[in-house]
Image (tube, rainbow, N blue to C red):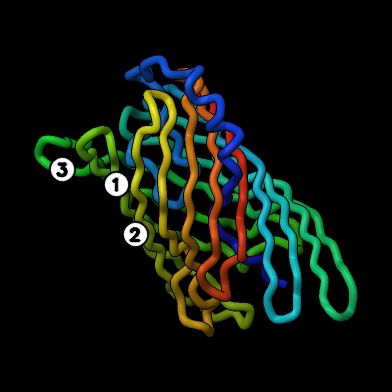
Amino acid sequence: MRVKQTTPGALGALLLAAAPVWAADAPDDAIEPDQPGIVESSSTVGKGKVLIETGLGYQRDKSDGVRSRLWSTPTLLRFGFAQDWEFRVETDGYQRLRATDANGTSTASGWADTALGVKWHVQDADGDTGKPGLAWLLHVDMDSGSAAFRGNGVRPSLRLTAEWDLPHDWSAGLIGGLYRDRRDDGGHFIGGILGASLGWPINDRWKGYVEIAGDQLASNRNGGRSISAGTGVTWLVDKRLQLDASLNRGLTKQTADWVLGLGVSVGF
């Protein structure tokens, strides 16, 4: 059974209660994680710096008479080998799937595939002129995971992400791209990636966002369209530590009904 994939999300209400305690000014050289959400930042980590983004994801789905629950540990390692370039290793980590249908319940556990990639920061954002921050991301997903979660062969993708600085510390982001995948019958196809987000400050260290995410845009023969809507919060504890939480709702049959997650990002 192919597992529906979408951006991890999670509950933010408990974290929001602590926001007033951390109202100090956010440092200028703070980390800028790509998680949560599909619209990644246009920044890179900087030469010689490392950023680890990880967390716990949970998704729930019911379709075609099958009720499934999936736990995962999505992780992204970013290493800056030049000021505007970074090397990336990304995976959904260790996963556990529980599926129930008319024939009973089955479970599967194991490791997700790993992707290797690079990000190139092309230009900085300029709020005065409306110029967005831009970055290209090239990833190659490899069929390296456990049998239950392994994809079909090597799957490259190319994405362009853009960020705009808006008045009153609001921000907007767009991401678009293409990926190449392989069907179970061995045929190849090209699919699309498209997402948009809007972020706003809650205080100096807390931010909220909403997002519409299409992480799989293809014909029904090639897996269909995976589209979700989500919201979440990020909390910059200090300049090298960020916590995040988000909640996503699937909008199409190919997307999990609900996706929740908690994340932590640590810079070195």
The residue at the point 68 percent across, 76 percent down is 63
* Nearer the observer, 202 or 27: 202
Compute the Cα span from label 3 to label 2: 17 Å
* Residue ID for mark 1: 172
Looking at the image, residue 92 sits to the left or right of residue 120; the answer is: right
Q: Residues within 10 Å of mark 2 (few under 14, many from 20)?
A: some
35 w.r.t. 156: above or below: above
Q: Is residue 65 visible?
A: yes
- Find residue 176 and name its label: 2
Mark in front: 3 vs 1: 1
Q: Earlier in the sequence, mark 3 or mark 2?
A: 3
Q: Residue furthest left?
A: 129
* Nearer the observer, 20 or 58: 20
Compute the Cα span from label 3 to label 1: 12 Å
**Callout 2 secondary element:** strand
* Residue ID for mark 3: 131
**Callout 3 secondary element:** loop
The residue at the point 48 percent across, 18 percent down is 22
Q: Are marks 2 and 1 in contact (CB under 8 Å)?
A: no
Q: Is residue 80 visible?
A: no
